[in-house]
Amino acid sequence: MGRIPDDDDDGPETSSTSNPMKDVLEEALRPLTVGSHKDLAKAILQKSLLINEVQMLLSEKRTSLSSMRTGIAINAIPLSLLVLMVTMSKYYEVSEMVWEIGTLSSFCILLLCIGTYMILRSLKKLHDYDRIILEIKKKHKSIGRFIEEDRE
């Protein structure tokens, strides 16, 4: 970890693993006293980590919404197959196609179960992410004003 040179120190900062963002922050805060600089830097890092956590939760929320959209699409497939079966029913006898209709019905039920599972799991995750974001908003008032609430 590099050090901040004092105002009377004209030597360069020596750090083999220098972080560009840290260098910019240190340069901007150089006129401050060392004690206040540490407190300010610590506060900035805490806010930054908090914002990153909220951003990560929001990206997870988007992923859950994508999963829900996929579940809805999977639930639409059996409906399409059912429409196709009814439309084509004048070209076959149900008594002659019992095994095929039974297999297709089983496949449709399986797809409905998978789609419903994906939707329910996504709803649960969305609720969990909303709860965590609300806790962060209540705990940290300074960040909470930037997080929009769902209007129900």
Image (spheres, rainbow, N blue to C red):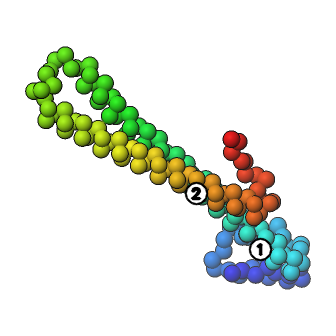
Image height check: is 130 above or below 32? above
The C terminus: image quadrant: top right
Disc 1 and disc 2: Cα gap in Å? 29 Å
Residue at 34% over, 34% down? 77
Q: Nearer the viewer, residue 18 or 80?
A: 80
Give left or right: position of 99 versus 4. Answer: left
Residue type at the position of mark 1: Lys
Give left or right: position of 58 versus 124. Answer: right
Can see residue 40? yes
Image height check: is 40 above or below 80? below
Residue at 38% over, 38% down? 75
> Which image quadrant is residue 85 in?
top left
Q: Which residue is mark 2?
A: 128
Q: Position of residue 91 (x, y in %)?
A: 16, 17
Marks 1, 2: nearer the viewer: 2
Residue at 69% over, 61% down? 135
> Which image quadrant is residue 106 in?
top left
Give left or right: position of 26 versus 115. Answer: right
Q: Which residue is mark 1?
A: 42
